[in-house]
Image: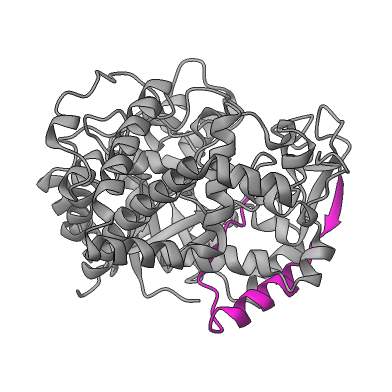
Amino acid sequence: MRFERASGILLHPTSFPGPFGAGDFGEEAHRFIDFLVASGQAFWQIMPLGPTGWGGSPYSSISAFAGNVNLVSPAGLVSSGLLEPSDIEHPPDFEGASGDDSRIVAYRRGLLEKAFHQFKGRVQGDQELRRDYDGVVADASSWLEDYALFAALKDRHDGAGWWTWGPALAHREPGALAGARRELADGIAAHRFFQYVFLRQWLDLKRHANSQGIQVIGDMPMFVAHDSADVWARPHLWKLDAEGQPTVVAGVPPDAFSTTGQLWGNPIYDWARLRGEGFGWWIDRMRETLKLVDLVRLDHFRGFAACWEVPATDATAEHGTWVETPGRELFLAMRNALDGELRVVAEDLGTLTRDVHQLRDMFGLPGMRVLQFAWGSDAHDSHLPHEYTPAVVAYTGTHDNDTVGGWFTQRSAPGASEAERWQREHCLRYLGTDGREIHWDFIRAVQMSVAGLSIMPLQDLLGLDSSARMNTPGRPEGNWAWRFAADALTPELARRLRESTERYGRLRAR
């Protein structure tokens, strides 16, 4: 896959401003698309849209298919006749709340339940609403029934992991499932409805973006959570013991940043069984994701060549083993099933072996370059702009990086190490700048490079400091909560970005 020269902005929907505690698919999302158009951008990159896990992380979800219903716009429910205006006139004061704050979750869940009650009263006599609902639900039928039952059971068990629900439900005995479907029929219908309004609002928003010439880049974590509808519904596809517990879990080995490695804890796929089923679960996952987005960034791409498997009883990732993954067979199967094309960007960051590069290049997948990673002593570092090729996506930073402003300030601070100060001086010399607008220096560098696509987090476009950082890997709390100010996207900012985009040949005709 090759890009026509273009650029875009990285921003997750939770970061939109608004009165309901966290961003959603409402009016501010549409205004952001207007800003993308005005500033000459062609891409909007987001993070995973699934239900968030512990700490509000979109990379730890209870489903590889379902949507995060906290992104549903309350105002959109009003405009579609599923809530009354009075239902949202006086929202609580959520000032300072994080995106997964229990108050926000409870408030939005209450609105969704009101909307569901209204929907049940309307749908019997509203033929148009019935047809729309039935169509959306039918299109999601490959995963929705398992997910709705799983979510209703999670509600009944106060969020406890599926393996604690008792042997009959944990092992999906047919009689127990049939009984649960009868007992929880209304809760299952509610979760089915919640996914309907998520899909309807998101697909309407994406359609609006596409109509304005904006393509959406989504994000797919390689692994899924143990406590997920996917593992519960198809446990044979993961390396689990007879009690449903992982025998090995995912992570990465020790490196310069961690002497014990990173222990992620996700269960590892049973690739032999996936192969035996023609990789059907992965094909379904990619097909469903590509209904929601135009391109997919595959997180932890190196895991498709080999995974670091750690015994599930270990407390650190030190004693894991690299185990080969059938990535070539998987991508061939997906490509054949998806009209002969993989609309995928490979997250090929970190220390990689030759087999990872070969796998990426075999399928013509664009890789990633991150300018913040460029400032070592190697003049041929692949993250330096003069080393880019048209087959890469160049970033000023990612959701896991500090903002450019924060990164630069840290290397200018009195407590900065000698190595950090050297990085700062190297950066200034290379970019030929005094650093007063370092964020624009970074933006200019990736835009003027030969990379087919350049992407900047909105925080970098706004020149924000470390307080606007989206995620700090290894920090368990305080992530994923950043939201931009309602008055941040000014016409002057759009004009300046458009001029830069046009100057470096990235402006697309619409």
| Segment tinted magenta in the rendering | 321-350
Q: Residue at x 56, y 50 (%)?
A: 147
Q: Nearer the viewer, residue 52 or 486?
A: 52
Left or right, 492 with respect to 194, comes to left
* Residue drawn at x 86%, y 30% as measured from the top left: 314
Residue 90: image location, x then y, percent: 16, 23
Q: Position of residue 39 (x, y in %)?
A: 19, 57
Q: How many marks?
A: 0
Quick one: which residue is furthest to the top in this view?
A: 414
Relative depth, front residue between 431 and 80 = 80
Q: Is residue 233 visible?
A: yes
Residue 194 at x, y percent in the picture: 39, 46
Task: Say above or below: 96 vs 228.
Answer: above
Q: Is residue 1 left or right of residue 377?
A: left
Q: Look at the image and say whether residue 166 sits in the magenta stretch.
A: no
In this rendering, the answer to whether 359 lies above or below 249 is below
User: Which residue shows up at 41% across the image and 35% down it?
Assistant: 403
Quarter holding the C terminus?
bottom left
Q: Note whether 294 is above or below 441 in the view shown.
A: below
